[in-house]
Amino acid sequence: MAVSHLFVQNCAGPLMIALQYNDLFDLLSISTSTNTDALPKGRAFTFIKAVQTVNERLVDQNKTESLLFEVILIAKECSEEIKMKIVESVKHYGIPAALLYDQADHHVLNQLKVIFSGDVIGFSEDSLDSLSDFGFGETQIETFKAAKICVKEFAVLIGQMRRRFGHENSPLCTCVLSVWGSRNICATALKTLREWGLDVDEVYCLAGAPCSPILAVVKPHILWDGGLHNMRDSSAPS
Amino acid sequence: MKGQDPMPNTCPPASNGDSKASWEDSKDIHENTGATKKPKSPKPENAVTIAVSSRVLFRTEKEQMVFEQQGIEEYLRYQVEHENEPFAPGPAFPFVKALETVNTQLRELYPESEELFDIVLVTYNHAHVGVRLINTINYHNLFIERFCMTGGTSPIGYLKAWHTNLYLSADTEKVQEALAEGIAAATMFMSDKQIEVSETQLRVAFDGDAVLFSDESERIFKAHGLDKFFEHERENENTLLDHGPLKSFLELLGKLQKKFYAKGHRLDCPIRTYLVTARSAASSGIRALKTLRAWGLETDEALFLAGAPKGPMLEKIRPHIYFDDQMFHVEGAAEMGAIAAHVPYGIAQKYPHKKNTKTSK
């Protein structure tokens, strides 16, 4: 499912993704693991492999491509022993994606799936009415506004990257998911993203239906909603 | 041959840069001026969810041809270029409109209830077509707030996520996949002739064998002929037939009908159901009726044709949708201008009807 601790910074060249090491490797099961070569895979593992696939395809097309994903691992407050294990494990898992699989999730590794929130992007002063039907208060409305500004940078870069590939067999798949907004809010989101240079591949409009069953089928790696995922699955956020 | 309505004068032309203003405007123009607010969509598990694909809700033959002849890139470019031209109504359109009519009346009688029809657009079309589809929904003033455009991957997984009770598509393979998952489903086709249907009453007609009931008796007929079939049905008159793929949908319609009866609308109920079977009333039809009764189900009318062609009867009934497992009957219905949907289930798919054999059962 979605990675919750994801920070994206806009730099001139690569699209930087910072991950905590304990999302990439599962350190809690170290003591029970008999494998002394590498740390067991954590929940963000398949995500990183999918990112790797996108990079490989971008470089395939253009050897001097600068718009790539770059992943940095944040590892603070861990022992030297763990640090060594992390370095070894990164080397160890540097194998083509097809060999590695997160058993629990069965994520597809040859495609990175990114979802943008249709509610955030399609949000306008006029859509306030329908959002308050779902119990959103003033502070939450302010959050929508702030989130929309944040997501634009990321959407622009993803849009550029997406255009390196055709409509079929793309290693990068982009979606819009609108949980609360009406179909017209969703349409506004699609048009806004297009203005920003991103024509998404898939779109889902739930109009208040619970989103976990749908997300379980969509299986995204990144869900960009400006932190609103905590309000998911409730028609009236508390 | 496909009628594509140009945008009426009341709609503002929307150019590509002008996103927000034109969407807000068209929303204002097309919403009911009488209504204060759009009602909220019911929770999927409470509603009778009908999933329709874009190709049966609207007419997309031209675009389909672009896709088949020129490939996906050109197809998507074409769709975006024609974004402000709404699609014309497709074969499932009258059915969807009739469902909305029922909803309006249900809401009046039971304002707090979520036991309503909920229509979801489920299509493997690409999100590039999304804007045009939403535009079309607005243009026709349909109440469809939920959709899944999966950009090429199979939509079947989403049917379960939406608690789908009936799936209508132009693609027989997808329909078969849905049937295999236990979801009532049927394929619809566009025909050139279309007789007028009621705007005040939803009419749903069902074939018996391999639609409401299993195909067990049809198997006997196909394997051993008419006489054996009669014998078998007589001997098993008091044994219930097994259920078919559309039984659950009839059941749901029955539940909604009872809500109207409870408020004194038995005679003018806005939902009417029909059994249209080749079985005959005096003999093989008895087993069908006994089975329905044992299930606690009924249809408002049961028409036993004893092998006569179904077209003229359907022309009289004018259903918004008629479900049959045999393409022969679906085509016959279409020739008369009746709206028919094919349920690709059972033995008839392996041994399609031959025109010169007798069909009386």
Image (cartoon, coloured by chain):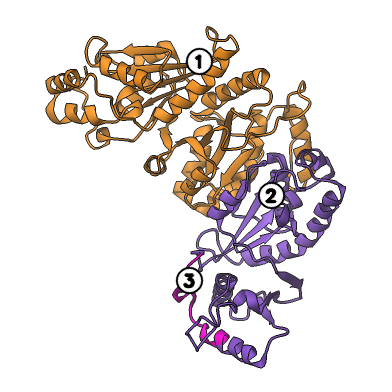
Chain colours: A purple, B orange
At x 41% / y 33%, what residue is drawn? B186
Q: Which residue is mark 1?
A: B196
- Tell me the subunit letter for badge 3: A
Task: Look at the numbered disc 3 and give the secondary structure of its residue.
Answer: loop
Percent x, y of residue B329: 32, 24
Residue A101 marker = 3
Residues marked 3 and 1, same chain: no
Binning the other alpha carbons within 10 Å of mark 3 as few (below 14), some (14 to 19) or many (20 upward) gives some
Observer able to see residue A111: yes
Left or right: residue A129 versus residue A217 is: right
**Gap in Å between the C-alphas at discs 2 and 1?**
37 Å
Residue A84 falls within the magenta-colored stretch: no
Nearest the camera: B193 or B157?
A: B157
Identify whether A9 is placed above or below B355.
below
At x 58% / y 9%, what residue is drawn? B264
Percent x, y of residue B289: 32, 16
Percent x, y of residue A85: 58, 88
At x 69% / y 27%, what residue is drawn? B8
Which residue range is magenta in the image?
A: A89-104
Q: Nearer the viewer, mark 2 or mark 3?
A: 3
